[in-house]
Amino acid sequence: MMLSVRGLTVSYGPIGAVHGIDLEIGAGEIVALIGANGAGKTTTVKAIAGLLPFGGSVTLDGTPLRPGAAERNLRAGIALVPEGRGILGRMTVEENLLMGTYCRTDRRAAAADLAGMYDRFPILADRRAGLASLLSGGEQQMLAIARALLSRPRLLLLDEPSLGLAPKMASFVFELVASLRADGLTVLLVEQKARHTLKIADRAYLLELGRVVTSGPARALADDPVISQTFLGGRPLAAEAPSGG
Ligand SMILES: Nc1ncnc2c1ncn2[C@@H]1O[C@H](COP(=O)(O)OP(=O)(O)OP(=O)(O)O)[C@@H](O)[C@H]1O
Ligand SMILES: [Mg+2]
């Protein structure tokens, strides 16, 4: 496994948010993390990215990751596209993209990657000198993903990339994520749009109140009664009676 998470616990002060999550991601997989608001999805990916203190263990290719070592994790190949995208609106599109390369020492290759990103996302090339805040929501998500890719990650953590996007743009983002696998990337995809997510993911974990309640192949989970009744039917999981464990 590329990433192994064992017994992950995260608290905000005295309040526990993640209560012992086990999760594995194999090289080349798209693994989905789905669950309702407050389930602990963001907390889990932030802990993996090194942005939060945690208990338990997280290993990348067998090497333990230290809690809170975000920059080290980035250099080790873990990039996060945060919830809300983390675009700096008062900076230009290009300045935002260049932030993605700051941890790299191969300046030539980084410059070539930047040019390649403009080829891949022509709209970003058109807007490169404009303020990032002037991009549409979908374009900002594209920018956030492009910026993360410019660190040349092996593992990309995406936190609700389709949130707040018009359906057409959301579909574009899902297609983009699916295409990343062809580039050899490994992806942990946090989403609330379970139906669409399970179509592009290989495997998925369903979180509820900081715990994994169901996991398995994405195709099987799409048929799982727990998921189809409580999640894919449109009712949030949190509105359901607790399953009792
Ligand atoms: N900075 C914080 N301080 C205190 N509690 C927090 C903080 N961030 C999250 N929490 C709590 O931790 C729990 C998990 O939150 P988290 O943001 O990880 O959930 P999520 O699954 O990402 O939800 P959403 O779908 O709304 O993004 C929630 O109970 C939340 O209220
Ligand atoms: Mg979240």
Image (cartoon, grey):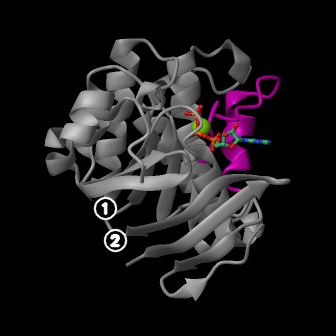
Residue 26, numbered label: 2
Task: Name which residue type carries label 2.
Answer: Gly
Secondary structure beneath dot 2 equals loop
Q: Ligand 1 within 8 A of label 1's CB?
A: no
Disc 2 to disc 1: CB gap under 8 Å: yes
Number of numbered discs overlaid on the protein picture: 2
Residue 125 seen in this snapshot: no
Residue 132 included in the magenta stretch of the image: no
Q: Nearer the viewer, residue 12 or 70?
A: 12
Q: Answer with left or right where residue 176 lies relative to residue 85.
A: left
Q: Answer with left or right where residue 56 lies relative to residue 216.
A: right
Q: Answer with left or right where residue 83 lies relative to residue 99.
A: left
Q: Residues within 10 Å of mark 1 (few under 14, many from 20)?
A: many
Q: Answer with left or right where residue 149 lies relative to residue 185.
A: right
Residue 101, numbered label: none
Task: Name which residue type carries label 1.
Answer: Glu
Q: Nearer the viewer, residue 65 or 18?
A: 18
Residue 128 found in image quarter? top right
Question: Would you say the magenta stretch is mainly helix, strand or loop?
Answer: loop
Secondary structure beneath dot 1 equals loop
Give the image quadrant in which the ligand numbered 2 is located.
top right
Residue 29, numbered label: 1
> For the view shown, which residue lies furthest in the right direction?
13
Instruction: State the residue at coordinates (31%, 56%).
Output: 215
Q: Position of residue 44 (x, y in %)?
A: 59, 55
Residue 132 vs 12, above or below: the answer is: above
The span shown in magenta is 81-101
Q: Position of residue 118 (x, y in %)?
A: 50, 36
Instruction: State the residue at coordinates (36%, 14%).
Output: 167
Q: Position of residue 160 (x, y in %)?
A: 51, 35
Q: Residues within 10 Å of mark 2 (few under 14, many from 20)?
A: some
Q: CA distance from mark 2 to mark 1?
A: 6 Å
